[in-house]
Image (tube, rainbow, N blue to C red):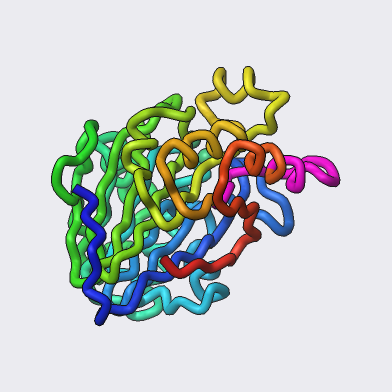
């Protein structure tokens, strides 16, 4: 599992953070979501509001999307899907767009389609559904020309998955989504080039983090250290006062020997 020996002829994957904030956004920092871009596969992971516009701002043609994976049903991770689908239709899409998610995510998508009817009476493109397992996947849940994708359950207030995307060129990015620090995510992250881990709270709010099923920056960093990842990007954090972002990064850097980043929206990484 997670073999990363490379076919070096294939270009690596690019990871773009479409948002880096928690559920409470600011002018600079919107809800966390990311897109993994390969030569042929473009995977959107989570879909808060205005995903179409954010892809454009990131320099990714939204019509290049090949898959959407929603990690859990919370609004800041899923509520933008009907708008994205409508925009894709208005933009001329006819290609199918598979949607990957846990059973309750698929039910949410059913409800959103029935309520918002983003295509009116039309069916401009197919939305094949792939139900993700409630346990760690023992085989890739998705394999394309560019990537192998694995998921594992996190430890959140609703069922949620963490996602590992291995580029066939050799690198791997792991995204925790919302979770307490947990062993399943640590195993999924093992040896990753880049771990994008949620860090909703600073260290002095560790009790709040546990109660609300989130992590602190230091907890994310300890997990990154144990998993032997190369770089750690802290996301799902909304600074409420000056200096908080620097403090988050410092608390994490004290626990992790590799590079710690507290990235801005639209930050890009090659893995
Ligand atoms: Zn969230
Ligand atoms: Zn959540």
Residue shown at 53% from the left, 34% from the top: 222
x, y (%) of residue 150? 25, 48
In front of the other: 14 or 221: 221
x, y (%) of residue 190? 35, 44
Is there any visible trace of residue 98 in the rendered image?
A: no
Residue 168 higher or lower than 238, as above or below: below
Residue 80 higher or lower than 184, as above or below: below
Compared across the picture, whether 90 is left or right of 20 comes to: left
In front of the other: 233 or 116: 233
Q: Locate the C terminus and report the quarter of the image it occupies.
A: bottom left
- Magenta range: 233-248
x, y (%) of residue 226? 44, 36
Residue shown at 40% from the left, 40% from the top: 227
Q: Is residue 142 magenta?
A: no
Residue 207 higher or lower than 51, as above or below: above
Residue shown at 58% from the left, 47% from the top: 234
Query: Which quadrant of the view contains residue 157?
Result: top left
Residue shown at 45% from the left, 42% from the top: 177
Q: Residue furthest right?
A: 242
């Amino acid at each position: 599992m997670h073999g990363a020996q490379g076919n070096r002829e294939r270009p690596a994957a690019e990871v773009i953070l479409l948002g880096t904030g928690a559920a409470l956004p600011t002018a600079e920092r919107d809800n966390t979501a990311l897109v993994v871009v390969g030569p042929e596969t473009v995977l959107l992971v989570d879909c808060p509001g205005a995903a179409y516009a954010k892809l454009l701002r990131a320099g990714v043609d939204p019509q290049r999307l090949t898959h959407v994976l929603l990690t859990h049903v919370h609004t800041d991770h899923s509520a933008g899907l009907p708008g994205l689908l409508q925009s894709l239709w208005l933009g001329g899409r006819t290609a199918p767009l598979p949607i990957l998610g846990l059973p309750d995510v698929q039910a949410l998508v059913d409800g959103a389609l029935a309520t918002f009817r983003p295509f009116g009476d039309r069916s401009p493109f197919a939305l094949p559904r792939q139900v993700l397992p409630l346990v760690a996947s023992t085989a890739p849940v998705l394999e394309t020309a560019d990537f192998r994708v694995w998921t594992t359950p996190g430890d959140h207030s609703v069922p949620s998955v963490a996602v590992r995307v291995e580029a066939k060129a050799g690198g791997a990015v792991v995204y925790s989504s919302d979770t307490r620090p947990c062993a399943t995510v640590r195993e999924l992250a093992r040896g990753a080039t880049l771990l994008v881990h949620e860090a909703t709270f600073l260290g002095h709010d560790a009790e709040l983090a546990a109660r609300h099923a989130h992590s602190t920056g230091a907890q994310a960093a300890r997990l990154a250290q144990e998993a032997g990842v190369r770089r750690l990007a802290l996301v799902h954090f909304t600074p409420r006062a000056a200096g908080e972002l620097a403090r988050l990064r410092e608390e994490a850097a004290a626990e992790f020997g590799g590079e710690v980043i507290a990235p801005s929206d639209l930050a890009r990484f090659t893995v």
